[in-house]
Image (spheres, rainbow, N blue to C red):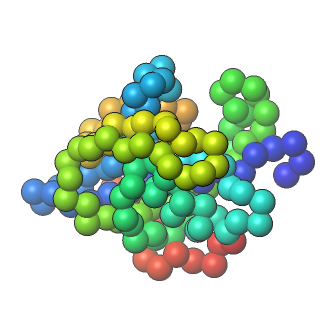
Amino acid sequence: MSGGRVRVAVYVTRTASGAPELLVFDHLDAPEAGTQVPAGGVRAGELLTAAASREVAEETGAEVELGQALAVQQRPHPHTGEPRVTVFFHARTSEVRDGWVHEVASGDGDDGMVFRCRFVPLARPGELADHQGEFLHLIERGEGFGPAGPIA
């Protein structure tokens, strides 16, 4: 895709008290960024599945079991208007913390960013930034989990 950016976003879920919950976070230093799910750019030569797992680890520190790709979103970047494609994945976690603060230490320029991570009810996640909630209904229907498929 010439002039565009390829990204991944990950819906990380767990079951607590018999109900599914979604992992979200807020930038402590940039509250205007809004509540988000783990997401970010795919590096040159990086598999989409590797990028999805990396983004979850970098932004939340949570360990996950990555499932299948759910959907592809094509939207212009909200600030630049440049083309952008985001592949959404579903992942599960056995994370027991309900909330925590995570500082990025990835070595790729995002170091020092601080995120407040927490679980919210999947049925009522609140407003997610940048149209990230567009495919949550697929999780609610039980789609997207199983071994990660052959998507590169």
Position of residue 149 measured from the top left corner of the image (x, y, whole percent):
57, 77
Q: Residue at x 47, y 79 (%)?
A: 147
Position of residue 76 measured from the top left corner of the image (x, y, whole percent):
72, 34
Q: In which quarter of the image is residue 50?
A: bottom right
- Report the side of 106 relative to 14 (left or right): right
- Report the side of 151 relative to 15 (left or right): right
- Report the side of 131 relative to 87 (left or right): left
Position of residue 103 measured from the top left corner of the image (x, y, whole percent):
42, 43
Residue reaching furthest to the right: 2
Q: How many marks?
A: 0
Residue reaching furthest to the top: 32
Front in this rendered view, residue 125 or 138: 125
Q: Which residue is drawn at 55% across and 52% down?
A: 106
Q: Quadrant of the C terminus?
A: bottom right
Q: Residue at x 87, y 42 (%)?
A: 3
Q: Which residue is drawn at 48% across and 31% down?
A: 129
- Report the side of 87 relative to 119 (left or right): right
Front in this rendered view, residue 100 or 50: 100
Q: Residue 134, can we see it?
A: no
Position of residue 110 measured from the top left corner of the image (x, y, whole percent):
58, 41
Q: Residue 40, can we see it?
A: yes
Front in this rendered view, residue 132 or 34: 34
